[in-house]
Image (spheres, rainbow, N blue to C red):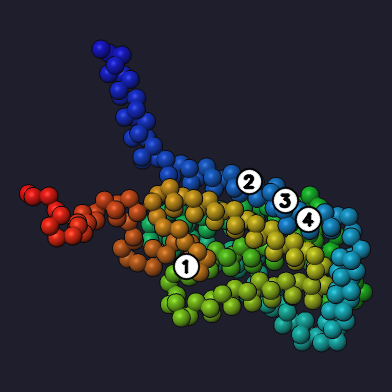
């Protein structure tokens, strides 16, 4: 009798633990694993890395030709150089971009959007660490041009500015997009694309990065965001929420003061549907 009681309790305890910790535990595990695996399974970025390391002649010619052409333009227009340095050093500086993400994460915490705040923080940190580790693994030298107009420390591939702009703009977009009226949503998308492309241009035009460095930063940033976003979407499905699209934002419920309950709760709260049997076919009461 005691053995039967013990066996009966085990499924009940297991179900209780699964119900209370299953979705959150799966979310945390998948998020960490995806962040670690991002730099390993980034196929487009890996291809770019192979081409850079092998000094593929077409890519090498593209890097060299573009750098020399933009460098000549910079030498002829000092005011343009100062404007580019202002953009890359203040407006689109990685520290500024990460501070914006940090402010958004704190705001999400005040709204009790714990998992969305965790996603934003992990995406930003994973992007920064992955880019830094990749730089030191590749150890590619920065361009050496005559009469350089700007200088930057560290290694060249991938571009940290380009990668940070990609991850930060993606985080800001996917978090804040639900707060923007539908008719105005093309505007933040345009601003994000302008920032990401603009950062890449400034780094090449100032002679501190090759074109392939910028493309590598974009690809690696997209890989990080994609991995963590898929993990977050998996948690939403585990928690019974609806699947979202990039046009809706990562968690559309953030725009409401009363967040949408999980799908299972919505189904349980629905009144029973009325019967649609034709007249005369219903059983007598």
**Distance in Å between CA atoms under marks 3 and 2:** 12 Å
Q: Can residue 99 be seen in this view?
A: no
State the SS at label 4: helix
Label 1 belongs to which residue?
Answer: 248
Q: Is residue 247 visible?
A: yes
| Residue located 69% across and 74% down the image | 197
Sooner in the amino-acid sequence: mark 4 or mark 3: 4
**Distance in Å between CA atoms under marks 1 and 4:** 31 Å
Labels 3, 2: front one: 2
Q: Do the residues labelled 3 and 2 touch (CB within 8 Å)?
A: no
Please tell me how crowded label 4 is: few (under 14), some (14-19), or many (20+) other residues with Cα within 10 Å. few
Q: Quarter of the image holding residue 205?
A: bottom right
Q: Pick the quarter of the image with the N terminus.
A: top left
Please tell me how crowded label 3 is: few (under 14), some (14-19), or many (20+) other residues with Cα within 10 Å. few
Residue 145: percent from the left, percent from the top?
90, 72
State the SS at label 1: loop
Q: Which mark is residue 133?
A: 3
| Residue located 66% across and 71% down the image | 196
Labels 1, 3: front one: 1
Label 4 belongs to which residue?
Answer: 47
Sooner in the amino-acid sequence: mark 1 or mark 3: 3
Labels 2, 1: front one: 1
State the SS at label 3: helix
**Distance in Å between CA atoms under marks 1 and 3:** 33 Å
**Distance in Å between CA atoms under marks 2 and 4:** 19 Å
């Amino acid at each position: 009798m005691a053995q039967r009681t013990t066996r009966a309790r085990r499924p009940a305890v297991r179900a209780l633990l699964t119900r209370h910790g299953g979705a959150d535990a799966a979310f945390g595990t998948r998020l960490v694993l995806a962040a670690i695996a991002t730099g390993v399974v980034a196929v487009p970025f890996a291809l770019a890395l192979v081409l850079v390391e092998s000094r593929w002649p077409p890519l090498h010619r593209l890097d060299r030709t573009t750098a020399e052409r933009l460098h000549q333009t910079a030498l002829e227009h000092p005011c343009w150089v100062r404007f580019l340095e202002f953009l890359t050093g203040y407006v689109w500086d990685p520290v500024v971009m990460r501070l914006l993400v940090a402010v958004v994460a704190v705001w999400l915490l005040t709204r009790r959007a714990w998992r969305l705040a965790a996603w934003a923080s992990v995406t930003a940190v994973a992007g920064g660490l992955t880019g830094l580790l990749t730089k030191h693994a590749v150890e590619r030298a920065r361009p050496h041009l005559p009469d350089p107009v700007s200088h930057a420390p560290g290694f060249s591939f991938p571009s940290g500015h380009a990668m940070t702009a990609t991850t930060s703009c993606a985080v800001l977009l996917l978090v804040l997009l639900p707060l923007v009226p539908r008719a105005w949503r093309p505007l933040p998308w345009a601003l994000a694309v302008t920032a990401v492309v603009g950062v890449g241009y400034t780094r090449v035009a100032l002679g501190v990065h090759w074109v392939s460095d910028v493309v590598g930063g974009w690809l690696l940033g997209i890989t990080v965001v994609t991995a963590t976003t898929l993990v977050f979407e998996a948690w939403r499905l585990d928690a019974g929420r609806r699947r979202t699209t990039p046009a809706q934002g990562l968690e559309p419920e953030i725009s409401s003061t009363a967040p949408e309950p999980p799908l299972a709760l919505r189904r349980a709260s629905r009144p029973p549907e009325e019967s649609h049997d034709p007249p005369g076919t219903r059983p007598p009461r």
